[in-house]
Structure formats: C-alpha cells, structure tokens
Image (cartoon, helix red, strand yellow):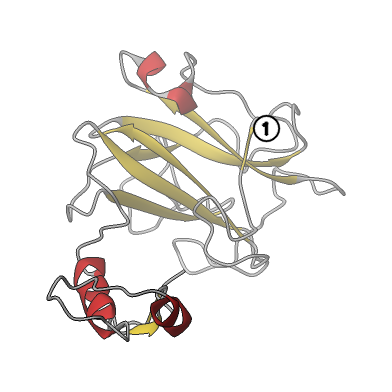
C-alpha cells in the first residue's frame, strides 16, 4: 500500500525496487527502462491531492452529529454545575441513548423519527468509543450522527438508561424536548450540536432556565 505524508510526498511506494529489477519495465512510455519509482511516485502524489474523502454532497440531506457531555461537574448555560441525576437515576449497565421526534409533516422521511412526534426512549444507543461521530473514546462525551433532510426541525433529548426502558428514571428532564433547525450555515454539509446532559438552561421547546434567554 502507498504511504504519503501530510504534504503528499510518497514515503512508502507500492512500486518496489525489486519489482523493477526483475522486470524490464518502461512504465513512463519514453522507450527507456525505468529503474526506480520516482516518476510513478510523482504522479501518485499529484493525483492523491485530487481525492476528496468526503465524497459528493447530498443535495437533499445533511449529516448532523449530536454530542452530549455526561462528565460530572460540567456547566449549564448559566455557568452553574449540572445535576445529572436530578431526574435520571444511575445504576450499573446504563448507557446514553438518543431519542427524536419530528415536527415535519412527513416524519416517515426521517428514519430517526419513525412516525412518532415524541419518539421512543432508550432505543438508539449513542457512542463513547471513538466511532460513529464520537471524537475521543471514554471521555464521557457520547455521540451519534444521522443524515436528515436539510432545513428540517427536530425535537430531541437524551436518556441515560437501559435498552427498552421507559422514560421514568432515564430522561434528562420530563416534559420538554430540545429543538434544532437543521441548517448548514457554512456549507460544509455537516451540522454539529453539542449539549450537556440535563442542562435546564438549554434550548428547550417550552421553557428553560437560561437567565439570558427568552424561554425557548
């Protein structure tokens, strides 16, 4: 496999000297046997810079990454300490789940919403293992990502529970849901939402405790 450094210099060529020594190869097409990989490596570095690993943008959907901070001592929107277990209870075996409901008139277009406006708790497990949008394994920040229609408005929240458990004893707070309008403002085809579990001063759909907010 070829290896290139950050400046696209080839530090490990797939065309070894042994291969060239054993075969009478003129891979540059100039009529002269090529005894090294310099020309091949130069072309490889040139075309490698054209590769775009993010692929082609989706005209209809945008990738949304949700991350929730579950670290003890994290701050809420007013700068105070969050009480993680004011509503949720802790016990062995629990993990973080994501639940969403849609205000869209066609929620079936959005797989994470199913057909329910409020969603079903403790079904969509989040990740704290460095995969599925999670940045650092085991840091107490859980993440998950979805591809959703551009411009859709979502209601969502987090639960600390056991798979299949009901709302009671798992949801970060009852009644309210968080809200997000999925708008890709900078045009990079990603939307990142970073939250703190049980933050009563966050963007709730009804009333929050943010002293600088307006209740939404």
**Residue 199 falls left or right of residue 49:** right
Q: Is residue 131 above or below residue 116?
A: below
| Residue 11 placement: quadrant | bottom left
**Residue 175 falls left or right of residue 91:** left
| Residue 123 placement: quadrant | top right
Coordinates of residue 75 in the picture (x, y in percent): 54, 67
Q: Residue at x 26, y 72 (%)?
A: 44
Q: Residue at x 75, y 32 (%)?
A: 163
Disc 1 residue crowd, few under 14, some 14–19, many 20+, Cα 10 Å:
many
Coordinates of residue 26 in the picture (x, y in percent): 24, 73
Coordinates of residue 81 in the picture (x, y in percent): 59, 67
Asked whether residue 177 appears in the rendered view, the answer is no
Q: Residue at x 66, y 57 (%)?
A: 83
Coordinates of residue 1 in the picture (x, y in percent): 47, 69
**Residue 35 falls left or right of residue 93:** left
Per the image, the residue denoted by label 1 is 122
At mark 1, the secondary structure is loop
Q: Is residue 59 above or below residue 138?
A: above
């Amino acid at each position: 496999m070829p290896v290139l450094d950050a400046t696209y210099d080839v530090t490990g060529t797939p065309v070894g000297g042994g291969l060239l020594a054993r075969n009478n190869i003129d891979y540059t097409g100039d009529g002269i046997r090529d005894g090294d990989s310099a020309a091949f490596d130069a072309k490889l570095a040139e075309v490698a810079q054209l590769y775009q690993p993010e692929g082609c943008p989706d005209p209809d959907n945008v990738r949304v990454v949700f991350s929730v901070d579950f670290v003890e001592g994290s701050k809420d929107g007013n700068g105070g300490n969050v009480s993680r277990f004011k509503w949720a209870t802790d016990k062995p075996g629990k993990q973080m789940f994501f639940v969403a409901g849609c205000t869209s008139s066609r929620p079936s277009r959005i797989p994470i919403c199913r057909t329910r406006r409020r969603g079903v708790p403790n079904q969509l497990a989040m990740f704290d293992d460095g995969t599925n949008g999670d940045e650092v394994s085991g840091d107490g920040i859980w993440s998950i990502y979805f591809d959703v229609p551009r411009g859709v408005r979502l209601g969502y929240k987090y639960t600390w529970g056991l798979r299949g458990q009901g709302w009671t004893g798992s949801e970060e707070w009852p009644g309210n849901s968080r809200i997000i309008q999925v708008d890709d403002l900078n045009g990079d085809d990603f939307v990142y939402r970073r939250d703190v579990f049980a933050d009563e001063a966050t963007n709730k759909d009804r009333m929050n405790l943010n002293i600088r907010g307006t209740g939404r």
